[in-house]
């Protein structure tokens, strides 16, 4: 084939397009690979292979409902700061790039669209903490402990009443978690026909309002 100057310009343009696009694809894949390495060096001991978690010890980080509802800010800040008072230490020493790579690795397991921004934009809970305590004592404390202390209190659920969680989780995130639960874990949903209890929106807000008071008790 004879290459005219017009063909040469076209090929050059195509080459520039390819070179301009491929680094993004490779960078995304490299982030996942780097995150996999860092995960296996720092996280696998508690959260297990593929971050499936271990009941009563460490939660699943690749659960589809978690990855669908959690924002990157929630995941990044949790890894960076850890959860004081629990077995989750801070990993700030990995640097922002390293932590972002771990989040990229976790996101590679996603089965649902990331609704984190939408979930975090939900309105703040406005409820009655006295009524919330009644629901919490009946349906939450069994796994999460009477004060939401989680595993350290002998529960099978996470420490949802401690500042390390409550300072990072928005009311929308907690609300969606109560509604949907976490499939393939002991945390089942509490709204709708398939829920352990068909809680109303107001009852869920009552629980959230009570949870916000737990660190002060």
Image: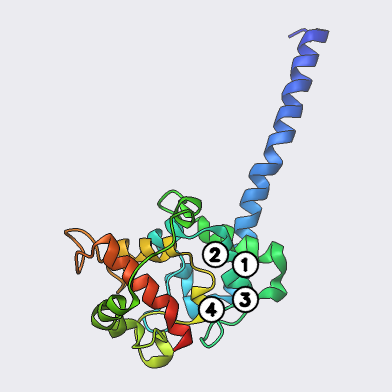
Q: Is residue 207 left or right of residue 164?
A: left
Mark 3: give few (<14), some (14-19) or many (20+) Cα within 10 Å: some
Separation of residues labelled 2 and 1 (CA atoms): 21 Å
Separation of residues labelled 3 and 2 (CA atoms): 11 Å
14 shown above or below 79: above
Nearest the eye: 5 or 117: 117
Foreground: disc 4 or disc 1: 4
Nearest the eye: 30 or 72: 72
Q: Number of callouts in the render? A: 4
**Residue 117 appears in view:** yes
Q: Residue at left 76%, top 21%?
A: 13
Separation of residues labelled 3 and 1 (CA atoms): 20 Å
- Identify residue for label 4: 164
- Identify residue for label 2: 74
Counting residues from the start of the chain, the first of labels 3 and 4 encountered is 3
- Identify residue for label 3: 81
Residue 42, image x, y percentages: 60, 76
Quadrant for the N terminus, please: top right
Please say which color scheme the image uses. rainbow
Counting residues from the start of the chain, the first of labels 3 and 2 encountered is 2
Counting residues from the start of the chain, the first of labels 3 and 1 encountered is 1
Q: Is residue 138 left or right of residue 20?
A: left
Q: Residue at left 20%, top 58%?
A: 192
The secondary element bearing badge 4 is classed as helix
Q: Residue at left 27%, top 67%?
A: 203
């Amino acid at each position: 084939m004879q290459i005219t100057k017009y063909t040469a310009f076209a090929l050059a343009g195509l080459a520039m397009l390819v070179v301009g696009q491929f680094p993004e694809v490779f960078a995304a894949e490299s982030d996942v690979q780097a995150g996999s390495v860092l995960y296996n060096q720092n996280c696998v001991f508690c959260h297990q292979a593929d971050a499936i978690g271990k009941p009563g010890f460490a939660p699943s980080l690749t659960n589809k409902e978690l990855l669908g509802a959690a924002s990157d800010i929630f995941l990044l800040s949790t890894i960076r700061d850890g959860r004081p008072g629990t077995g989750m230490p801070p990993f700030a020493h990995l640097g922002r790039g390293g932590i972002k790579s771990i989040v990229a690795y976790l996101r590679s397991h996603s089965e649902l669209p990331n609704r984190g921004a939408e979930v975090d934009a939900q309105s703040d809970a406005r409820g009655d903490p006295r009524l919330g305590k009644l629901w919490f004592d009946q349906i939450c404390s069994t796994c999460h402990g009477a004060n939401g202390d989680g595993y350290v209190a002998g529960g099978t659920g996470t420490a949802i009443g401690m500042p390390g969680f409550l300072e990072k989780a928005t009311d929308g995130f907690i609300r969606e978690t109560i509604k949907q639960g976490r499939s393939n874990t002991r945390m089942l949903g509490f709204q709708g026909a398939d829920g352990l209890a068909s809680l109303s929106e107001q009852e869920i807000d009552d629980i959230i309002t009570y949870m916000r008071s737990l660190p002060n008790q």
